[in-house]
């Protein structure tokens, strides 16, 4: 059997080989680094999505294990230009200190990192810099780590903010994750290709408007029936249901948005099956749909192509 390091190298090699000759210069590549929830499980790491467009590599959320997943797909932290947070729940940000500090050292990052997120993001980044000030100082003095490479340039953004660079346009929009406010979804546009990330949300009319006709819609889902079968207390399940989107509701979203492909991520419960999630979605939506998994790669071009790390064949959605 292969040890863990050998498996990681093989996964990186698979990802690099999959990259060659597949995505054109005007495509968007999306890699699901983590598709899980706060549950500490090994098959679904914390919420995190890598988006590559043109010369840019951008991260959306940084849940538990984000750095390990980036390493598995062969992406160096020094090559990530920025991080966008959908909201500041711990399962979406808890992997950030590891990305930031370990990535700074291991990849020898030399340039500041831009971070964008809802109100409170700038304050959180300032507090992290203070919390780790001893480590930062000693790494610079002892290991000569780059002073610039550990700098975070953080900005609180609101709806109306637009990131635009080298043809990549990113727009946050408000979603309904009350009482967490603000909480954002993000739309990424590049040379006529488009991706929408829902973030955490209940059924959202605003998301439907912002995502209309998108190539790829990545949406969260909460399979409450699966939680209840697993023994979750009904009152806890009711709280989860009140903050998230059921498969049936997501089916209505997809039917109205009409994406080329819909993909589930941030899947609650992590062990939910296609029967738990896909089957109830089909009550309202008959279009292309995938149950996301960690390290799934989605190329958005003339067609939308999905590769699963454990699968030998590709699937193409038109």
Image: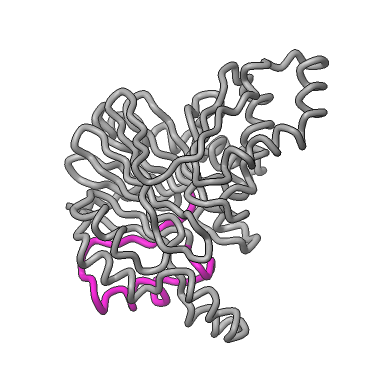
The correct choice, above or below, for 295 with respect to 219 in the image is above
Please count the marks in the image. Answer: 0
Which residue sits at x=64%, y=42%? Answer: 124
Q: Residue 87 versus residue 259: which sits nearer the camera?
A: 87
Q: Which residues are magenta?
A: 267-294
292 magenta-colored: yes
The correct choice, above or below, for 119 with respect to 82 in the image is below
Residue 12 seen in render? no
Q: Position of residue 225 (x, y in %)?
A: 47, 82
Q: Position of residue 61 (x, y in %)?
A: 51, 46
Q: Quadrant of residue 43?
A: bottom right
Q: Quadrant of residue 239?
A: bottom right
Q: How is the image coloured?
A: one colour
Which residue sits at x=29%, y=64%? Answer: 205
Q: Is residue 177 left or right of residue 255?
A: right
108 magenta-colored: no
Q: Residue 151 versus residue 221: which sits nearer the camera?
A: 151
Residue 254 seen in render? yes
Q: Position of residue 204 (x, y in %)?
A: 34, 65
Q: Position of residue 5 (x, y in %)?
A: 65, 38
Which residue sits at x=62%, y=36%? Answer: 99
The correct choice, above or below, for 82 with respect to 257 in the image is above
Q: Residue 166 versus residue 285: which sits nearer the camera?
A: 166
Which residue sits at x=82%, y=28%? Answer: 134
């Amino acid at each position: 059997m292969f040890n863990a390091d050998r498996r990681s190298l093989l996964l990186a090699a698979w990802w690099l080989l999959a990259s060659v000759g597949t995505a054109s210069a005007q495509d968007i590549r999306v890699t699901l680094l983590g598709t899980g929830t706060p549950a500490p499980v090994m098959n679904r790491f914390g919420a995190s999505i890598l988006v590559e467009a043109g010369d840019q590599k951008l991260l959306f959320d940084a849940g538990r294990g984000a750095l390990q997943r980036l390493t598995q797909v062969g992406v160096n932290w020094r090559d990530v230009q920025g991080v966008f947070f959908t909201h500041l729940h711990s399962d979406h940000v808890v992997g950030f200190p590891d990305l930031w500090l370990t990535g700074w050292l291991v990849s020898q990052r030399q340039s500041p990192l831009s971070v964008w997120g809802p109100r409170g993001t700038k304050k959180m980044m300032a507090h992290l810099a203070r919390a780790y000030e001893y480590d930062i100082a000693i790494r610079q003095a002892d290991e000569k780590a780059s002073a610039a490479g550990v700098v975070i340039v953080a900005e609180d953004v609101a709806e109306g903010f637009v990131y635009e660079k080298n043809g990549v346009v990113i727009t946050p929009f408000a979603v309904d994750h009350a009482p967490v406010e603000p909480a954002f979804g993000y739309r990424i546009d590049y040379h006529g290709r488009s991706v929408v990330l829902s973030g955490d949300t209940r059924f959202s009319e605003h998301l439907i408007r912002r995502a209309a006709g998108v190539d790829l819609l990545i949406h969260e889902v909460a399979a409450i029936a699966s939680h209840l079968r697993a023994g979750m207390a009904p009152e806890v399940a009711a709280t989860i249901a009140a903050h998230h989107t059921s498969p049936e509701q997501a089916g209505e979203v997809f039917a109205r948005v009409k994406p080329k492909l819909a993909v589930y991520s941030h899947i609650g419960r992590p062990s939910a099956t296609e029967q738990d999630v896909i089957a109830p979605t089909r009550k309202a939506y008959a279009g292309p749909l995938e149950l996301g998994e960690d390290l799934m790669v989605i190329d958005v071009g003339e067609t939308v192509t999905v590769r699963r790390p454990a699968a030998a064949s590709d699937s193409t959605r038109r």
